[in-house]
Every structure is written in structure tokens, then in C-alpha cells.
Image: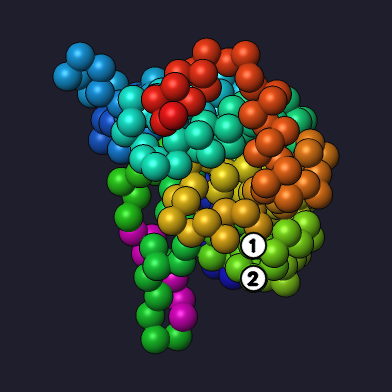
Amino acid sequence: MTQLADVYIELERFAFNSMGSMDEPGSDHIASFARESWTEYVNSQMVPLRPYRDPRDYIQSSIELIIRLIMRGERYAGREIDAFLVHRFLLDCIPRIIEHYTYDDGRFYLRHADDKGDHILVDGEYNITGIVDWEWAHTDSKTEAFKSPVMFLPVSDFYDRVSTIGGDESTFADILEAKGNKRLAEIVRNGRLLHRFQFCCGYDFADWEGFLGLFQGLRNAVNLDADMSWVDWKINALERYSGDKSLETLLGQTG
């Protein structure tokens, strides 16, 4: 953890002016997001999410992209209504999520997009010798780029709606603070809501039980439709969004 904390501190030294992916070796140029899940095809042309300077715009655009894919039958086949309602609700959550971006400074920082742990290479004495699989890396807001790596999440608690961070996250935050970087430590300590929101966006419904726990935890955390069962929440959401033309279209298609 100590060496990974050093990596975090080093990455904070390099700030960028927008969110997106680096596309020119040897340059700090930021281009569109180089990630398949943030790409759609329009008139046979591949259209990725463009670079952003405002995290709110990025979050909204990424969720709206998922909704467009749902409407075209390219995602969540067989669960279109559930997926639409969830992501329509996530759009409503954005103002409350942005309230937690309290550590942002208007700059953006390199973030590994698959930090489950197998991206870190170590030697026989557990010294970090390399970090691999950067192909989906992108720049992100400080609050997002420096929250805890996914590999430190307490998996059972995370899916079971526990709102506090786990022991590994707490230890990692303490190490960052001991190294003189209280800002990054506080980002780690306050990252649970952002992890929940991130996981719910585009979550694979094949793990339905896992999703229900995550979604319940998110609703409790933002105090929107808190403590409602999935069945009750869906009935409420169908009523809430009954005037949405996209929902009406899906209901008409699915009978």
C-alpha cells in the first residue's frame, strides 16, 4: 500500500485541462474517450464520448449514451424497462453526486480504468515493478481519479449496503496522510458514494442480486427513494417517469 500511495502522489503532480484519453505519445493532448462502453455507432460511424471540462457534463453524457443504446436495443435486451428506469433515476441523482466533488480543483488527472488489482506487477518481495493495462486509462476529476482503487473495497459490505469504507481503504488513506497528502487521504475516505454511483451506471444485470444491493445502497446514500424494495421502487418510478416519451416508446415495444 505504501508504494501504491507513492504512485497516487506522483500522479497528482501531472494535471490536464480536460477529461478524456491521451492519444499522442509524448504529448499531453486529450482526445475522446478510448473505451468501447463509451462509444456508439451513428450512421455506421464510431462516435466516442468527446473530451469534457465539466464533470457534470461528462456524467450526464455517459448516462444518456447508455439510454440511447437501450432505446436502440443494443444494451439490456430483455430488461429494457428496468434498465431505462434505473438510468433515468441516475440522471436525477447527478446534482447530489456532484455535491461530493468537493476536492476538485478544475484540473484532471490520469486514472487507471481497471484497478481491480491484477494491473499491478510485483516481485517476490511484493515490491511494485510495474502497472499494466493502461489502454482504457483516461483523465478524470481529482475526486474520481484518487478515490480508493476497486481492489481495496470490502466486497461483501459494499454489496450489502454498508456505507462506511473498509479497513484496507482506511489504511490506505492513513498512509497517504502520513506521507503529507491529507487531500488525497480525504478523497479516499469519502469515496463510497462515488463508487456506488459508478458501479450502478451500466451495471451488468446478469448479477441481479448484486445490483439490487448496490442500487439500494445508492438510494439510501443520496436519500432518494431510500429503503424502498425493488418492486415498490419500480412501481413508483413508472409513475414518476410516465410522461417520458422514451419510456412510453419502450413500453409500447415490450407490450
Outermost residue on the front side: it is: 255
Q: Outermost residue, bottom direction? A: 124
**Could you classify mark 2 by the number of other residues whose Cα lies within 10 Å: few (under 14), some (14-19), or many (20 or more)?**
few
Q: Label 1 crowding class (10 Å Cα cut-off): few <14, some 14-19, many 20+?
A: many
In the rendered structure, which amino acid carries the disc numbered 2?
A: Ser
Rendered residue at 45%/50% (across/down):
204
The answer to whether residue 150 shows anywhere in this view is: yes
The residue nearer to you, when weighing 98 against 3, is: 98
Please identify the quadrant where the C terminus is shown: top left
Residue at 50%, 34% (x, y): give it.
Answer: 81
| 229 horizontally vs 148: left or right | right
In the drawing, what numbered circle is on residue 29?
A: none
Q: Which residue is mark 2?
A: 156
Residue 165 is situated, as x and y percent measured from the top left of the image, at 74, 61
Instruction: Read off the magenta span.
Output: 126-132
Q: Is residue 113 left or right of residue 143?
A: left
Name which residue type carries label 1.
Answer: Tyr
- Is the N terminus in the top left, top right, bottom left or bottom right quadrant? bottom right
Q: Is residue 199 above or below residue 159?
A: above
User: Which secondary structure, mark 2?
Assistant: helix
Q: Position of residue 209 (x, y in %)?
A: 57, 61
**Numbered circle sitting on residue 159:** 1
Identify the residue at image location x=62%, y=54%: 212
Tag 2–tag 1 contact (CB < 8 Å): yes
Task: Tell which of 50 and 28 is nearer to you.
Answer: 50
Q: Quadrant of residue 59?
A: top right
Q: 130 or 143, which is in the foreground?
A: 143
Q: CA distance from mark 2 to mark 1?
A: 5 Å
Q: Tell me where residue 20 appears, x and y as whole percent.
A: 42, 29
Please report the residue visible at 45 percent of the width from the left and 85 percent of the height from the top.
125
